[in-house]
Image: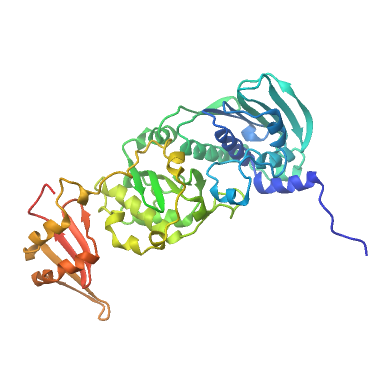
Amino acid sequence: MSEVIQLLPDVIANQIAAGEVVQRPASVVKELLENAIDAGATDIQLILNESGRTLIQVVDDGSGMSMTDARMSFERHATSKIRKIEDIFEIYTMGFRGEALASIAAVAQVELRTKQADDTLGTYIRIEGSKVIMQEPCNHAIGTNISVKNLFYNVPARRNFLKSNQVELKHVMDEFVRIALSNPQLSLSFHNNNMELYHLNSGNLKQRIIHLFGKSLNDKLVPVEENTEYISVSGYIGKPEAAKKTRGEQYFFVNNRFIKSHTLNFAVQKAFENLIPEKSYPFYVLFIEISPAAIDINVHPTKQEIKFEDERSVFMIIQAAVKHGLAQYSVTPTLDFDQNAEFSNLEAFRKTPKMNENIMGKFSGGHGIASSSGRQHPLMTPSTPTWQSILPQTAKEASDIITLRSKMDENEDDFSLTPTLFDTLENDYLTFTPVQIHQKYLLAQISSGVVFVHIKEREEF
């Protein structure tokens, strides 16, 4: 019997690979914009015809490519980021400048013009269906201009599965907005059929949110900024009155890459519990910075779904960060990571993977959120008395103390005033550090229950 297994021709192999990366015009837009960002561009133009069916063009002022790199970028498995297997787990940037281009060139007609600052002439390359039709020097400004024409021209079955121009344009706009939110320091423009849809100047994250979603959000945005040894969380959430009946305006970015996560969405939803109507969804744009070694981004071809090494810790930290942000504007009680004993029991705080030393520098600059890593907690400021000094004084007033003892076996709660509790309270507090709420209350867990203290003696505290 003759052999039946054989290697696929390169053209077919590239088209199969393209099926994983290039699903619609929006897929091409995402890859090309990310390549432009990785090239260090500060100004990027996106130009479409017929919602990307006949033309997707991205023009950037980035570093450009040499003649050799321009040709190599269209080869399969070409990359500028990976030299050894360990590099896969230390990637912070977006595109790889090569992987997607080979797939795109397999199902479209592609023209590339690029030039580096040190080169006298640039490079022009034209490829159709993975075949290089032309390569020659050309005059070009510093940067890259890439045009993808007639997407799926050689795969009519795939082209027939595209939706209407309106639907495809909506998907492209979604990708553009995600890129714009994660890179507010860039100037971006977007044209479709010679009509300008977006013109965004460089700025900070809040300005970018307002430009994209309207001025009505200006006084409804609450900043979120929390740093732990495991992850850092920053961005903005909307006040409860900004909640809507749809999930559209909810964005999570991990290491500046947009992701979709039902778990993280639920964490934010839980933080807004009892603050917004049922079946309403809060607005948020949140950025998570975490060591690449603690996540797996290769669970989905588009890398929009990832796995966390310790998902429970991430869930708890996100929920607490949102609550803390709301509390700063007197929406909910405050919650401080260093003051809450519950977080010390999480695996991420017992065994913390070391974050790359440059991680803060890579992501914190463009979002316009001031870092709070050096701030002092309210209980530790020099002008504020410590809980050890103030608690014994207020403990003498029995009317200020409510002790909640939970009797799990009897399934009942006993609320009682117990002044004698403070005979042993000090030992309990050495184990469980109290949480300060609105600088008026102390809340702490003790061996026999929970203590809640209303501080009346020092209103300035």
Find the residue positioned furthest to the bottom.
409
Residue 446 at x, y percent in the picture: 22, 68
345 versus 165 height, above or below: below
Q: Residue at x 63, y 45 (%)?
A: 83
Residue 258 at x, y percent in the picture: 51, 45
The colour scheme is rainbow
Question: Looking at the image, which is closer to me, 291 or 105?
Answer: 291
Q: Does the image show residue 146?
A: yes
Q: Is residue 195 left or right of residue 269?
A: right
Question: Looking at the image, which is closer to me, 26 or 110?
Answer: 110
Question: Looking at the image, which is closer to me, 87 or 392?
Answer: 87
Quadrant position of residue 442? bottom left
Q: Count the marks.
A: 0
Residue 270 at x, y percent in the picture: 36, 57
Q: Is residue 453 left or right of residue 108?
A: left
118 versus 23 height, above or below: above
Residue 18 at x, y percent in the picture: 70, 45
Question: Looking at the image, which is closer to me, 199 or 183?
Answer: 183
Q: Residue at x 84, y 58 (%)?
A: 5
Quadrant position of residue 371? top left
Q: Does the image show residue 278?
A: no
317 versus 150 height, above or below: below
- Looking at the rendering, in which quadrant would you find the N terminus? bottom right
Find the residue positioned furthest to the right.
1
